[in-house]
Image (cartoon, rainbow, N blue to C red):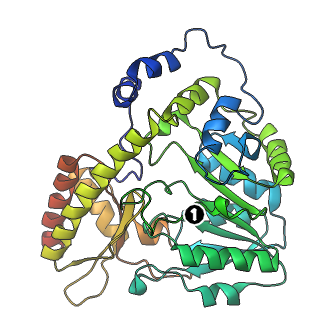
Amino acid sequence: MSTTVSSPALSIDDLIALSTDSQATRRGLSLGSVPLTYGEPNGSENLRHSIASLYTNPQVTSGHIITTSGAVAGNYIIFSALICPGDHIICMYPVYEQLYKISQALGAEVTFWKLEDSNGWSANMQCLRQAIRENTKMIVLCSPNNPTGAYLPIAVQHSILELAEVHDIILMVDEVFRPMFHFSPNHEEEPASFLESGYEKCIVTSSCSKSYGLPGIRVGWIATLSSDFIRRFTQIRNYTTISVGLVDEIIAAEVLSPRCRLNLLQRSLDMAKANLRFLKEFVAKNQLITWTPTHASTSTLIRLHNKDGSPLDDHEFALEFLKANNILFCPASLCFEENGQGGLQGYLRLGFVMSPETFRHGLEKLAEFLEAWPIFH
């Protein structure tokens, strides 16, 4: 069992096998004549066109896309280009630490907009409104959320967009898990990308790493309708990675092609749905584990507690469990809790997009270890 929040990594042969036109994919991945030189400053036109086609807003074109070395590089570029000392940032919490740590390092003050497990990891719009100041420059979101797996419903998205527009605030959204909604395609509850709103100060990032199961090619992207932002991001990237590798971009373009993309997503969704069904049964049988069900993403948080209801020391538990079973869970209080914020004691992040056999084995080991924990401890 692995705690990675991405799908199990694929090989080139796997990608060809998943394609609806394996011969076309094989030709598309023929790399023998590819020059091993720098890529285009903003990314190859072919790849940027494929990325733009993921968004239904006809305003979004290849000119609104910059490819990056994974979403992590895209996020870094955005903060480096736009955040200055003295700025105020509002960031969803808990969240992937990069989404606020870089702003703090750049001298900005960060206010956390907390998701509450007691209310299904939901977001309170009134708290967001109250957090806004005169110098608030950016609202930072991750939806679907890492680590909880929660996503912002359509009505909440609209409210956030309206709030950002009224106050002229940049809206930055890490959407790396956005394709991974566990209900059927085009379900009425599935929210569109924030980019679909048409708000010019909205910026989204994503990648091929998580939902598509291809972290090894290191391809992500930034998308925004603001030509000024695109110009500033390009300048920053010129001083960092310069470009994404040509070989990586060729593979990514094939991944996002109509003949491959949907099958890749379906592969991840099939594993997610099967494993979440088992997780639901598993939690129901284990009184020392509680869980708020998730309907998106590839990870979730489970809470371990003592018989009196108090949370276990998730850091110590994860470390000892790793030593005993060679299986790693991310202790949430260590990996996602910011000093003074609290609220994540006893939680472990659990990745659930993997083979059902591997997932069940990991949970069975967890149940055995948890039962023996009072004696072992």
Q: Residue furthest top?
A: 33
The residue that mark 1 highlights is 97
Place of residue 358 in the rendered image (x, y in percent of width and height, measured from the top left): 21, 48
Classify residue 80 as left or right of residue 280: right
Place of residue 218 in the rendered image (x, y in percent of width and height, measured from the top left): 56, 37
Place of residue 168 in the rendered image (x, y in percent of width and height, measured from the top left): 82, 74
Secondary structure at badge 1 equals: loop
Nearer-the-camera pick, 50 or 104? 50
Nearer-the-camera pick, 240 or 168? 168
Residue plotted at (49% across, 34% down): 255
Classify residue 314 as left or right of residue 108: left
Q: Is residue 60 above or below residue 312?
A: above
Instruction: Name the residue type under label 1.
Output: Glu
Q: Is residue 171 above or below residue 256?
A: below
**Residue 33 found in image quarter:** top right
Place of residue 126 in the rendered image (x, y in percent of width and height, measured from the top left): 62, 90
Q: Quadrant of the C terminus?
A: bottom left
Residue plotted at (84% across, 65% down): 84
Q: Is residue 372 visible?
A: yes
Q: Is residue 339 visible?
A: no
Mark 1 crowd level (few <14, some 14–19, many ≥20, 10 Å Cα): some
Classify residue 323 as left or right of residue 161: left
Classify residue 322 as left or right of residue 117: left
Residue plotted at (44% across, 34% down): 260
Residue plotted at (84% across, 79% down): 135
Q: Is residue 344 above or below residue 97?
A: below
